[in-house]
Amino acid sequence: MAKVGNRIVADNQKRIFDRLLGKDVRYYSAHHTADITMRFSSGAASARDALNLVITSIGRDALSLLALVSVAVIQDPFLAIISAVVMPIAVYGTRKLIKKAKAIFKREFGSAVKLNTVAMEFIQGVRTVKAYTLEPVVRERVHAYVDEVERAANNLVGTQAKSSPLMETLGGFAIAGVILYAGYNVVVLDRSPGSFFSVLTALLLAYEPAKRLARFHVDLTPMIIGANMLFELLDGEAPEMDQDKLPALPVGRGRIEFDKVDFGYRPGEAVLREVDLVAEPGQTTALVGTSGGGKTTIINLIERFYRPTSGAIRIDGHDIAAHSLPSVRGAMALVSQDVFLFSGTVRENIAFGRPGASEEEIIAAAKAAHAHDFIMKFEHGYDAQVGEHGVQLSGGQRQRLAISRAFLKDAPILLLDEATAALDSESEAEVQKALQALQSRRTTIVIAHRLQTVVSADKICVVDGGKVVETGRHDELMAARGRYYTFYQMQFAHERKAIGDAPAIADGDPPALLTA
């Protein structure tokens, strides 16, 4: 039985994880990690426990009760009916307990999610907590949620325990009624006591199974709720689940085209409005503009993390919505400002760019990203552990490992979202050279706040208010004296103020140093 239960947990967890892989980014934006992980771990266990309890109760208690009640009915139907008078009361009382247990368990689950959320956020943000001496605040929140979980758990146990006294009381009334009626029959009506003792024995033997079955319903309720949370995941939408059944995207040179694309993360809140944009093969297209203008959203749509509200996105003339996700994303390499590294070795994290790559290919990618030298300084080299989320590495080192992944993937389309933001000036100069070599034969889209990094781009698109308001080369946009010119002058003025007096520059000359 234990093996069957463990197999149920394992199968359900595999199904849940497959379903989670099929969820889109929007789902993870709307649900907290703690809620998802609790459903993943607790939901499968609840389904197993519920099945174990049902099998045990049906196999032992329900069959025993049915057999004993049948004996009582055969021996004396009227006595059996007298004992059954308490059944409606028992059912009513049990239903009230079940309803109360449901509400308590839901509160307990909600409090447990909040507790796990605070604990996870503390672990992930421990530097911020300690830097701002937030220990008392975090401690108070955790203790409050722990107390909530404890109170809910105690209330649940108390509610479950009430089923036993209820059934004992009702069972006592039933047996007392049987004894009174049987005594009247034997003493007054002079009937044989044989049937009376048979019925009484059957009822006494049926008492324990009946009590366990009453408690079974109350005990089963939290397990059913936990299992329902599991099935909510399994039955919910998974937009990416069957995307691999669509035809593969035939990628040629990697020309990207936005055709009147609208998009909003929430209904009624447009982030992009009628965006028309073309990124030519072998060229670098830079997206610049104020924060919140929609630059990162454009990359999110290219990667199909989200779907446009209207309009179409095409690669080499093919609408990406009509092709399989693996083939679309397989044609792209993404390096973002927020680098995510998995727990494991340096080698494993680079190899995620192309699973199955050889050692020579991994090292070549690291060298191209100017990561090889610092990797070899680690005691275990490419076998060094990066820690959870890459905590053992500096920001610049994490960034270069991400760039190494992109080199290793060798995709025709390269998406760079502030890819060099975490690098110092010397490292940035080296990586920029490597990126330029990588970009020369690829369609590259670059998001940058530092205009110094994009002045040499083949095309610069100014994104403001969800629209592409200007397009051109650096010198063309400077000559037009539009939005780009304003951004450029504001950024240079800010830098002049930061470094003190500096000679004026011509409109087309990039400043020597610009900050984000």
Image (cartoon, rainbow, N blue to C red):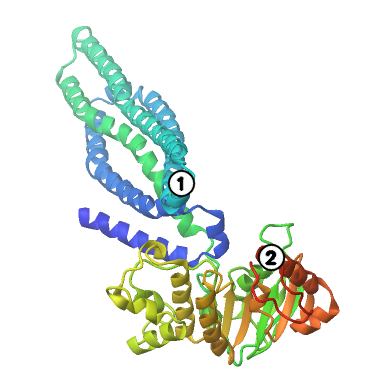
Dot 1: what SS?
helix
- 452 vs 218, nearest the viewer: 452
The location of residue 195, given as percent across then percent down, is 18, 22
Q: Residue 372 location in percent, x, y?
A: 39, 81
What residue is shown at x 58% (from left), y 84% (from top)?
A: 413
Residue 259 horizontal side relative to residue 81, left or right: right
- What number is the disc on residue 241? none
Point out residue 181 in the picture as x, y percentages from the top left corner: 26, 13
User: What amino acid is labelled 1 in the image?
Assistant: Val
Residue placed under numbered mark 2 in the picture: 500
Left or right relative to 224: residue 203: left
Q: Nearer the viewer, residue 361 or 45?
A: 361
Question: Nearer the N terminus, badge 2 or badge 1?
Answer: 1
- Can see residue 494? yes
Q: Secondary structure at mark 2?
A: loop
- Crowding around mark 2 (Cα neighbors within 10 Å: few <14, some 14 to 19, many 20+) is few
- Using the numbered discs, state the Cα–Cα distance from disc 2 to disc 1 in whole angstroms: 35 Å
Which amino acid lies under the numbered mark 2 shown in the image of this protein?
A: Gly
Q: Disc 1 marks which residue?
A: 129
The foreground one among 24 and 292 is 292
Q: In the rendered view, does 481 fall on the left or right side of 174?
A: right
